[in-house]
Image (cartoon, rainbow, N blue to C red):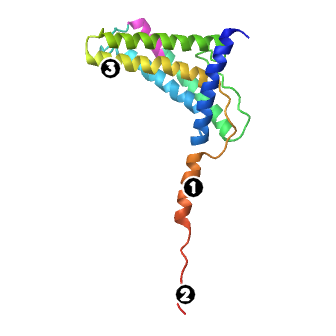
Amino acid sequence: MDILERVDGKILEFFTKISHKFQRLTGRTNFFLARLCLSGMAIGLLLSVISYWIPLLHRKTNLFWVFVEIFVVLRLTFDVKELEKAEEQNFFGEVTQKPILRLLPVHNHIFRVFVFAANIFLTGIVLLAVATGIFETATTTFFTIIDHVLTWPAATCFCYFAVVTPMPPGKSKIREWVENFASGFRKPAAVESRN
């Protein structure tokens, strides 16, 4: 076992714990969390596309990257459908197949570690740029932070949540709380008889 596999195993362990706690609490699987991450990536990419026409970011997006990012967002929709299918399979107690994701090779541990390292590096650069005041306006600073906070961390979380093995379906804590709360209102009151 090489060092990248060990690092990837520790990171995957961390995301598995988060996913299983979330599933126990809400009943939603890691595939739901992966879909949320894909949504964050799509918002970050669309922000970059919008920056071609309206200068929101610190850099102007060129036309080539507009087409690339639109293509990536459209490809993300296929992955969202695969994740929805996998979550439905798990919900109905079927054997959950790992979804076939077309955009990113998330089943490759070297790729996942690379995305994790790139996330740390790029987030550090953006935070350093914000701290030193490189960006011209507050609007540019805000949207650049949103762009980088949504795109790279969401990509990292997606890569790991997509490969976590979900727990078997069960009743979530929230559902149990709601049912217990609702059952308190359903108990019939005792009627006293006057004899």
The numbered dot on residue 193 is 2
User: Percent x, y for residue 97?
Assistant: 71, 29
Amino acid, disc 1: Glu
User: Percent x, y for residue 73?
Assistant: 49, 19
Q: Is residue 191 left or right of residue 3?
A: left
Residue range (magenta): 62-70
Q: CA distance from mark 2 to mark 1?
A: 31 Å
N-term-proximal mark, 3 vs 2: 3
Q: CA distance from mark 3 to mark 1?
A: 42 Å
* Viewer-closest of 3 and 185: 3
Task: Determine the secondary structure under disc 1.
Answer: helix
When asked about the image quadrant of residue 35, the answer is top right
Tags 3 and 2 touching, CB below 8 Å? no
Amino acid, disc 2: Ser
Q: CA distance from mark 3 to mark 2?
A: 69 Å
N-term-proximal mark, 2 vs 1: 1
Task: Determine the secondary structure under disc 2.
Answer: loop
Residue farthest to the bottom, as pictured: 195
User: Percent x, y for residue 69?
Assistant: 46, 14
Residue bearing the label numbered 1: 179
* Viewer-closest of 38 and 166: 166
The numbered dot on residue 142 is 3
